[in-house]
Image (tube, coloured by chain):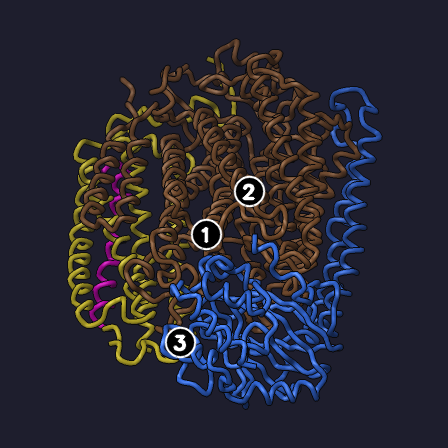
Amino acid sequence: MLLLLTLAGCGGSQNTLNPHSHPAADIANLFWVMMAVSFGGLALITGLLVFAWVRRGRRGFGADPDDPHPGERPSWFVVVGMGVVFPLMVVIALFVVGNGVIISSTQAPAASSTAMTVDAIGHQWYWAFRYPGTKAVTAGELHIPVRTRVNLVATTADVIHSFWVPELNRKVDTIPGRQNRILLYANTPGVFRGQCAEYCGLQHAHMGMLVIVQSKAQFRTWLAKQSAPAAAPTTALARHGEQIFLDGPCASCHAIRGTSARGFVGPDLTHLASRTTLAGLTIPNRADYLARWIVDSQHFKPGNQMPDFNLSQRQVHALVAYLEGLK
Amino acid sequence: MWQSRPGVLGWVMTTDHKRIGLLYFWTTLVLFGAGGAEALIIRTQLIQPNQHVVGPSTYDQLFTMHGITMIFFFIIPMTTGAFGNYLLPLMLGARDMAFPRMNALSFWIFLGSGIFIYTSLFLGIAPNAGWFDYVPLANAKFDPGHAIDFYCLGIIFNGISSSLTAANFIVTILKMRAPGMSFNRMPLFCFAFLAASWGLLFALPSLTADTIFLFLDRNVGTHFFDVAKGGSTLLWQHLFWIFGHPEVYILIVPAFGIATEIIPAFTQRRVVAFPLVAVAELLVVFIGFGVWAHHMFATGMPTVTVVFFAAATAVVVIPSTIQVFAWCMTFVTGNARFKTPLLFIAGFIFMFVAGGLTGIMFLAVPFDQQVTDTYFVIAHFHYIIFGAAVFPIFGGMYFWFPKVTGKLYFELPGQISFWLIFLGTNLLFFPMHIVGLEGMPRRNYTYPSGLGWGPENLAETIGSYITTVGIVVLLANLLVSYFRGLPAGPDPWHGATLEWTIPSPPPEYNFAVIPKVSSAYANWDYADREEDRRKLAEGVMVLEQGHEQPVSSPVDGWWAEIVEMPHDSPWPILLAVAMSIVFVLLLLHLWMGFCFALAGILLVLLGWHGEEPQEREA
Amino acid sequence: MADYIAGGVPERLVPRTTEARNAGEAKVLAGRRRGPSVAFWGMAMIVASEVTLFGTFIGTYYYLRFNTPHWPPVGTPEPRVVVPLVMVGILATTSLPMQLAARAARRGGLWAARLFLLWALVIQCGYLVYEIHDYVDQLRRSVPQDNAYSSIYYTLLGADHAHVAIGILLVVWLLWKLARGLTMYRLNAVQVVAFYWHAVNLLTLVVIGVLLSATL
């Protein structure tokens, strides 16, 4: 199966317990403490049940009519003490730490406290990213500078999705008609995987994204490049590919800035070749995969909105050559 | 004393709560099989990365139907429909439910709704937007066709059945208790079912309204959920969870009730802190109505709202911890005999505490928002729903098997089935915590390799197979016991409540003499039982004329009147058929036929109410 | 038969519902019964469920309202105020004859009960006929498909009219039953339907009040 080959080596993990930012670290630490306390609670209850098992059958069969409530008074102390007072204290402590302290370090940042804003737009089934103030538009791969407070604005083009990069912060849903925000921050450069977390239809499973954290200088270079219009094709084959793209059905769904292609159903392809993955992290961005994707995208991602166009081998070849040139 | 009509017709027309309970039992068991099969296909699909057992479209239908089935077509009808129906009147010392024909109607509607919604699966157009069915994904624009219409109508249809059952239970518990059984002499089982019934009665309308809006949006063109025209997608979520969270307690509180019957029987001790436990059972449902928005922490609600609902979620912990410690202390101070039913209850307590502790974690909003919509949540609520609702159902199946069939089950296979199910479910659900923390989202028909999710998923799938084997052993044990078991006698466990005072299986009229009750553990009040036997010999408090049933006042249990109950009746099933036709016609947009079918319903109702109690000759 | 006491009441003092063959006996039996009938409790549950359903509709109305800048939205006509208020006021008066019918039946006044029910029925039918006419008339100016306001407006109003229609069907059925005398079963029915109508009237008042709040 081709599917078996996919995604190995796409990089990045999405482990909530492997935090790479202070918000994610706060949440992970909170979890470890909660887990320790929980195991204590579970051990206590299990201990009581085992204790009862050890002492099973110690009296003869049947209730004692003279003493229908053996040990009732001490039991009340346990029920009220362990069942009301103790859990109340634990829950209040958790509430104060979780919803008083950690909530403020992880929630949507005040507008003035962030250095830049990124728009994440959920589509069935890929993520589009825009950098307000520039013309840069990309898909599937979000670049941000390291140690910078980023104000991420999550919106949707269709149904509810959820923006989630577990190693950087908690998730936030994209609700039609609303702009939900979350703080994005990374301590170190690296590649962090994220995924749509709210069920959004057939290909919910293939709606991944990579957050690529770069040094500030690298990021500035990247953003400048992404803001520029698409590179013109240089070879004859690529020019033929551009012709097919612009004249054929491709341009009605995809945009390539600097050309007449202005579709908005599928991802923006202006700098397609600068990305490492395709189709919401479904396949790596290599010429062979791209060609197979164009021929039969339904094979990789059944139900996605790109139909089969019955292109000839030659046309596909030309298209790939054109798209591979969009650095 | 009256007898049931023999043959198939006797079952079709029955108004006997025990027969209706058994009908519910068999129907829900079949639907449990269906929901379980769906779960097994899901688990097989996820056994390793990039599997292709089923495609995304089938997978979406399977996980949606799994959720719908287990919640609406297994646990609710199994606890309320089967256990509640069969046992409530027996524990209350009553001869029937308050509204026996309405009770039959509940069952036939339930059956109709089950067939209705499963038709969609056989046609390959089952609901596919999750049991939570969020808009806009469920709108006509993103989900054309009939799948979601099946969901809307099936849920409304099923909701009618549950509402009728809830109303019936509440009135039965309040009014049909044996004279002298004041509220504080009522078994904890009945408190639990009272709480669950109140929950159903007040929670379901919210879901009904929600699905009506969605049906109108999809089929009439209204704009309840259309943001462009002033609607709101969050409206769906609010209304859904105003139902959906009380629903969780509706699922588990009856199971608490089952536990509070099994524990005294096998520890030979009354439940510790009885009044606290009774109040806690009612409180947990009541507070459960105030926590719905904790399912929506990631939707970007204002922080104040989020924190308020987190606080409410913190409060709902307390009634549960009270009950857990009361059960445990009953184990400790009593004289526990770890027979199969009690093993299931011990397993239930373990699973409930484990699931409850992860539940407490969710009141920390940042953590909730990190792991919500991942397998961590699936682990949490399966520990609650499988561990805390289904374990007591299994325990209750063993516990009341001798009462219902008059036969004893086999103990060794029973214990084997417990350990298989206990180990299987833990192997099935515990790794889900880990894989959820490792970032695996829910509702994905497949997942990539290279993220380290493979071993956990493999373990989960193996666990699901072991659990299945355990359930098969359980059912086989009960089936063989039915034919080969030793006679049980009326009271094999020295149980605490009134059902153990009468023969097994119970006669149609339940109680030959209306029992005297002076505590919640009536079967252990030996003097009262002695008096019942004397009264039977003398022929008093027998009410042998016709189909008679005493009615009491709701709080003190004063004897208020003697009412004549209806006999077998064809009208409930006819009404359910007429209603099924109405829903099918709605689905198909046959509006004229729909109006005719409504008229048909009125005619059936006229016939129904043409049967009045016969006045006696002077 | 020895006189055993169960729940504080001796068996011979407990009324049997099947012992009332006429209005006079029903009156005597009803006097000996403690508290409301089982049927009344059943109806209370149905009403509780319906009230919750309407409560959800009303909650939806305000949820949508507070999410919308203009209510009703620009271009959608405001509901008329005076006529609906007068009509709902007239409908509310039928609680009186319904209650009087229940009281008369309880006292064995079969004819009085029938007449009070008829009185109520005439007003209720008049209300429903006018309101359906009005509903159709309003649909000429705006339709539920216009916007979320219209959607909830027509749904809530339509649900309330359906509620009134069910109440009317119950009264018609009652009159038909009472044509053949009074028994405990039918006495219960009169009391229960009277209770149902109080709920219908109260809900109609609330619903109309909610819908007219858009003009404030």
**What is the magenta range?**
C82-109
Task: Identify the residue under disc 3.
Answer: A244
Q: Amino acid at mark 3?
A: Ile
* Residue drawn at point x = 70 percent, y = 63 percent: A16
Taking the image as drawn, is residue C75 in sight? yes
* Residue drawn at point x = 61 percent, y = 21 percent: B477
Question: What subunit carries mark 3?
Answer: A
Task: Identify the residue under disc 1.
Answer: B57
Question: What subunit carries mark 2?
Answer: B
Separation of residues labelled 2 and 3 (CA atoms): 46 Å
Rendering colour (chain C): yellow
Rendering colour (chain A): blue
Q: Amino acid at mark 2?
A: Ala
| Sequence-earlier tag: 2 or 1 | 2
Q: Amino acid at mark 1?
A: Ser
Res B39 label: 2
- Residue C96 is inside the magenta segment: yes
Rendering colour (chain B): brown
Q: Which image quarter holds the C terminus of chain A?
A: bottom right
Residue depth check, mark 3 versus mark 1: number of the one nearer the observer: 3
Q: Say whether residue B269 is left or right of residue B530.
A: right
